[in-house]
Amino acid sequence: MRKTAKEYKESYHNIKESKSIEKLSSWKLKNDDDKFNSENYRKNMDSFLDDIAESITYIEKETK
Amino acid sequence: MNRIDERVELFIEGFEKIANKLDINDEYNLSLDLHLLKLAVEEYFKESDNIKIKHSIKFSNASKRMALTMNHIINNRPIFICSEADEYPIKILLINEIYALYLGISHFGYKKYLKEVNIINKFLYLLHNKKIDSEAFAIIIDIFESSYESCHKENINASKK
């Protein structure tokens, strides 16, 4: 069964706390990322879902 | 929570949303590699920093953010198919490309041209078949936008006449 987002987040926090993931890079974020707003981003994710799904359906029909 | 962890969590949510929307069932046993996802996000921030230094800008625009996101997700390919089916549907074969596009495009708010099937398919084609660096990708997105806007203006002017 596919893991849920909640389970993935828990796994992410576990591996982050075990520091194994930190070893991948010693680089630390210098600048904040622009005017990024996670709530707006979430809304945009919802607004594009149908369009992406529609495109995939279209491709699947075309390639049959 | 720092910016990197916040972004990783958003992308985890994105994985669940797109997998549910495309009705990807358990048969294909898709798995998201969190190390690769984190690496993609880190690389995104590194390159974003470099671009800002190179161009002496404080903020990068949405097309650059979209291009950087797509580029680093597609380079790291964090979604794995853990099944051995004889045949896979397109949505499974292109799952990393779809995921990259979905996360990238979500940097924009409502843009009519970005919601058109033809445009989305062209982006998927580019992601799947062409190796394009993120700056070139950002320019392509800007060209799409400006050509769409100029067509839109022409249509408005034509309807006024």
Image: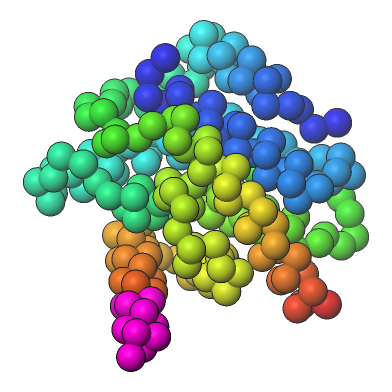
In the image: residue A12, left or right of residue B150: right
Q: In this rendering, is residue A61 above or below B49?
A: below
Toward the front, the furthest residue is B161
Toward the top, the furthest residue is A17
Q: In this rendering, is residue B147 above or below B161?
A: above
Q: Quadrant of the N terminus of chain B?
A: top left
How many numbered circles does the render carry?
0
Q: In this rendering, is residue B148 above or below B64?
A: below
For the point 29% across and 35% down, the residue is A35
Where does residue B63 sit, x and y in percent of width and height? 34, 55
| Residue A23 part of the magenta segment | no
Q: In this rendering, is residue B66 above or below A25?
A: below
Where does residue A41 sit, x and y in percent of width and height? 47, 37
Where does residue B135 sit, x and y in percent of width and height? 29, 60
| Residue B154 part of the magenta segment | yes
* Nearer to us in this view, B45 or B117: B117
Q: Quadrant of the C terminus of chain B?
A: bottom left
For the point 70% across and 62% down, the residue is A54
For the point 56% across and 68% down, the residue is B116
The residue range painted magenta reads B150-161
Where does residue B50 sit, x and y in percent of width and height? 21, 43
Q: Is residue B70 visible?
A: no
Q: Is residue A10 visible?
A: yes
* Nearer to us in this view, B151 or B143: B151
* Nearer to us in this view, B161 or B136: B161
